[in-house]
Structures are given as structure tokens and as C-alpha cells.
Amino acid sequence: MSASSAFPDSIEPGRHEPLGATVRDGGVNFAVFSEHAHRVEVCLFDERGTAELKRYALEGPVDGLWSGFLPGIQAGQLYGLRAHGPHAPCEGHRFNANKLLLDPYAREIVGQFRNLPEDHGYPFGHPEGPAAFDERDNGATALKARVAAPLRGLSPRANAPRHAPRDVVLYEVHVKGFSMRHPEIPEALRGSYAGLAHPAAIAHFKRLGVTTLSLLPVQFAVDEPHLSGTGLRNYWGYNTLGFFAPDPRLASGAVRHDPAAVAAEFRAMVHALHEAGLEVVLDVVYNHTPEGNEWGPTLSLRGLDQKSYYRLQADDPSRMENLTACGNTVNVEHPRVAQLVLDSLRFWAGEMGVDGFRFDLAPVLGRTAAGHDPRAAFYTALRQDPLLAQVHLIAEPWDAGPGGYQLGRFPGRFMEWNDKFRDTARGFWLGHGPDGQAVGRGEFARRFTASSDVFRPDPPTNGSGQRSPLASINFLAVHDGFTLNDLVSHGRKHNEANGEDNRDGRDGELCGNFGVEGPASDPVIRQARERARRAMLATLLLSQGTPMLYSGDEFGNSQGGNNNAYCQDNEIGWLDWPSADEALIAFTAGLARLRREHALLRHAQWFGTAEGGPSLRWFHPDGHEMREHDWHQGGRHALAALLSDGRERLLLMVNPGAVPARFALPAGEGARWSLLLDSSGELAPAPLDAGAMTAPSRSLLLCIDRRFQPL
């Protein structure tokens, strides 16, 4: 009996929901969206994925949906899709039934994408280019979906800690890079989901005082074609193809071959982190896919219905609109495409248990024909969803298209990466901003107080008047850029290892080497770098808003000046635990502890907006409240902030200068000050009985009025 004889002769009518392959009633239901296809087929393969055994035409379309039910089929069956329709590139259609397509809803994916010529819808070298039609069948080598069994047991969502927004401290981390060189994590678990949940990893997170891990992409991703043959790979994972499948490359070696076991390891990781009181946020990429521009391969969405799934150029539908600088742009404005994104989010929150999402190039999600719209239908659906209402929503508030910079313009509960804070904090302590000029007191004050000019504009726009200071995600460094250690050790990028002649990565990224490029032996330079680094960390964790640490910055991790380590799945991209600075870890943990212990440092209200609420006054080092001309005093950048809420009073003094600065201490209302922190380490915590004190060079000081200090 042939293998195909075990399959039913014909397909039965199926349900239109849920989309994808669903085990039910002794068989499998298939449902897929394609508005412009003339015929959609599901193709069953042998267990190796190389031989197509049976092909069935789905019924449809009904509202663009095709469906069918195959009795007797079980979880574990490999399958792919073929879509028949017009091949009319000039009209935006690139149907080619010779190309096996990955189900966009695949929860399990098998095989390896090798970017073969037959994966493309046109023959290489044809004079018509991507307008030509390729008749080769790629079914034997294409990626396959595997029918997934229902997930067993409670979702890790059941033990989610759900930290109050004001208590959140984010920690951006790569699953693999965190543990690959960690000496306390067993070698078999290093670089995996299990490694990130190992007790040694959890102990570090708890010691550090972070509450929420923001993971770089974990959805199934593939390498870009230009990396083929270079020995490099897409390490970061911002090239998502499978929106419902965890990436097996991030699983431990013992389970990597089995997609079901990979999903189980991911869920176990989330559960273990939740048990430790740690939240998990995923970096998600719904703005583009690996299919690239019109010259790219046909893997899934392009072959199913390019005109629906992607944004096409209005004056030439044969070409993709490229608002992402990655070749294509997902058309989230289309209701069914928005459904794909929302279904994926619900899957990761509901089934896999995660606590939120950071949306890469987020303005793409709200793009309409008129540009980015904070009232776009996708945002409305996202805000109204009862499950997604429970999780964090974080925007990277820019894309690569016209009008793509949208900081402060996201709706509702969205928090946003605030690059203005990054540039100001760096520039203030390095002594020069992005324009080469010193960062003034006023700019520092705005960013320290959660960028009210951005998130609480006057007059309010698009509901922005209802946003909290916590909407500002403050950061010093993230994955795409210099590490904190490198930005005080280098004056330019060093990306030669990426194989692009140092052309890739951001030119002109704000940094300063204090006189020597790279590692330095001069004690004066080393001290200046260390003080600047510590002052920046103190600024980050003591500012209003939501702080986010980049993994490794707490112990001085370096990438050798590489500010675009996207392809460095090696010691450049992995955290250098053997060289970790224990003193810096302790210092960073102490800052997080101060933030936890003093509510004034993490208010959910804007200063001065509520009766009896928090207030802030800015003081000149001479002791008087800042006057208009003081904010513009050239060459003078030191200043102080007095924070009060009726329960405690804190005094923060900042001196970014290369020489000490004397501060008069506010003495009103009988204040009695004690020093809690000197970021330079020169001064020890102690009562301050004099009316003035000297702040060391490049230092941030925090004092408390000890009349309010608990015994």
C-alpha cells in the first residue's frame, strides 16, 4: 500500500476559522486567506518533507477564505500550500503554483531555507527579470509546515506577575547571546530558552533588579541572501517568516530538531521566569518579511496574495513599497493582514504566556494612504482586545518611510523608545551632543522628567494629553548601536567583521573616546570613561519614565566598537561574562534599588499636575531657583533638582564637567540632607551638615532629607 493511499480520496467542507491547520474531530481543518487566488491547494508530504504525496483543492473563496477538512489526518503531518491565480506583476499579482508556500499560520516549521534559485518566482538571468515566470517546482526543498497538536497544560500566562507600570525596569536581551559564555550555565543549555531560565540567569536578573526581559526576536526567522557563503548569519532575528513558531535556533540542542519540543521549552522558560517574578516581552517584526522586494524569493505571503499582504507602489504595482529599508512592507491596513498580526499576538500572549510586545518599526502598523495615523484600525483593534489589554505595548516609533519619525504619537497605553533621552543622556556626560555642541541644562531637564514636550505636549494632540510619564522608555544603548562601554571608548564604528567594508551601521552615532580609540591604559582616560559610564547609568535609572538597560551594559560588555552586530553569532555578539566588572554590576543593582525604594523616582504622574502630587523645582548650583537666563548660561551645565511629594524630599545634583562643582544645599523648611549616592564613587553616603558640598567631576549625586528618611 502506498503512503498516499492512507489519505482520504477527497477533502470535506471545512470551517473558515481558525486560520491555519487545526486538529479537530478526528482530522485536520485547513483555512487560509487569499483574496485574489483562483484556487488554493493543500499538499501533504512524507515525513522527510521531500516527496509530495497528495494534493487537495480547498473550497472557496468565501470572503477571501479557503477551507477544507481532511479526516484521519493527525498532528505531525507535513504540508504546504499552492495558490493558483494571475501572474500579472504589472497589476501586483505574482501567483505561481509551482512554488510551495509556507502557511502563514504555521505553528511548527521544518526544513531549512537555502535561498535556492527555484525558490524564486522567476528564472535567474531572464531578460524580463522578476516579471518572468519560473516553471520549476520547489516542493522537495521548500520549508514545510507541520500540523501541531494542541498545546498541553496551563499556559504560562496563568502565573504572569503583572508588575505595575511604575515598577517596570526593562532589560533588552538576546536569548542566545546572554548565556553562550556564562560560566555557571551548563554547556548543553547555553544559548537557549532553557539557558535564559536557568537559576544562574534568574539570579542575575533578580540581583540586578530588573522586572521585565525584552527579548530580541524569537519567532522563526531566516538569513538574508547576502549572508549566504560568508560564514555569517542573521543573529538578531529581524527577518521573521513564521509568526506563530518559536525559532528552533534558540532552543537547546537536545530539542532543536523537534518543533513541538522547541515550543515546550519556550513555554517552560516563560513559566520559570514568571515564577521568579520576571515578565517576558517579545520584540516582534510585523513590518516586513524575508521575501524582500520584487527580486526576492516566493516563500509564503507573496505567493498567496501579494497584492493583499504587501504595500505596492501606487504608480507601479510590480514594485514593492519599501518603508522598512528591508525590501517590502507588510500591508497591515488590510483587515485580513491585521487579523494575521492580531492572531499572532494573541497566540504568543495566550498560548505561550508572554507579557507584552515591542513592535519593530512600529509606524508601519498604523500606515494609511495618508501616512501614519494614531487612529488607524489596527491600533483600535489592539486596544480593544481583552487579552492584549493585559500586556505591555511598546513601539519603536520610527520606520524608514516619509514621515516615519513618530515619537510621542502613539495612542493609548503604548510606551515608546525615546531616542531623545538616549542622545541627551549621552551628550550631556560626553560633553557634546549630536550636533557637536554641548547639551544644555534645559535639554537635560526635559529628558530627566520623561520628555513632557514629547509625551505631554501643550496643547495635547491625538489623546497625548492622557499619557503618563511612563510612556517614555529611556535607554542609553540597545542592540543596534554601541554598547555603553563602547560608546565611551570609541570615536567611530568598527564594523569590519560584518564584511561590508564598514559601510553598514549608523555613521555618526553619538560617542566619545576621551582621547584614545579603544582600550586605554592611561589612568586619567580610564577614570573619565568610568565616571561617564556610571553617571549615564545613574541618569537612566533615576530619571522619570520607564528605564531600559541593554544586557551587558551593567558589567561593561564590549563588542569591540561594532555598532551593528546583527550578523555576529560569535564572541563579538555574545556577552563577555569572563570579563564582567562585578563592581559595576553592584553599582547598577544599587541604582535599581534606589529606584524601588523611592517612589519619587518612578511616579506615574507628571510633576505639578495634581493637588498634593509630586513636585519638582530646579536649582542653580549657587542655591537659587533656576531663572530664565540660567538655562542658557554658556559653559555652565551643573544643576540640581528638588523632588517632593509630602512624604519624602530628594535632591539630585549633576555635574557633567571635568572639574568639581560646588553646590549650595537648599535649606528651606529646615531640611537636613544625607548623601545616598555619588556616581563617581569618590564620596561615601553620609549626613551632610554643612550648607554646601562639592560634587566631583562627572558625577550625579542623590541626597535625601533625613527628616523623611525611615529609621
Image: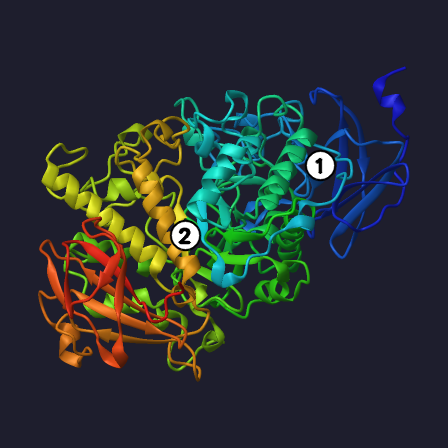
Q: Position of residue 302 (x, y in %)?
A: 59, 43
Q: Which type of secondary structure does the marked residue at label 1 adopt?
A: strand
Which residue is at a point 35% across and 43% down the rendered structure image? 586
Q: Amino acid at mark 1?
A: Leu
Would residue 508 be visible to someone looking at this image? Answer: no
Q: Quadrant of residue 702?
A: bottom left
Name the residue furthest bottom: 611
Closer-to-camera residue (95/674): 674
Q: Is residue 571 above or below residue 12?
A: above
Q: Position of residue 445 (x, y in %)?
A: 27, 68
Residue carrying label 1: 81
Q: Is residue 401 above or below residue 274?
A: below
Which residue is at a point 68% across and 39% down the rendered structure image? 106
Which quadrant does the N terminus fall into?
top right
Which quadrant does the C terminus fall into?
bottom left
Locate residue 24 relative to residue 196 in the image: left or right.
right
Locate residue 635 relative to residue 564 in the image: left or right.
left
Q: Is residue 522 above or below residue 164?
A: above
Locate residue 480 relative to residue 200 in the image: left or right.
left
Q: Determine the CA span between mark 1 and mark 2.
A: 42 Å
Q: Position of residue 79 (x, y in %)?
A: 73, 31
Q: Quadrant of residue 241?
A: top right
Residue carrying label 2: 548
Q: Amino acid at mark 2?
A: Met
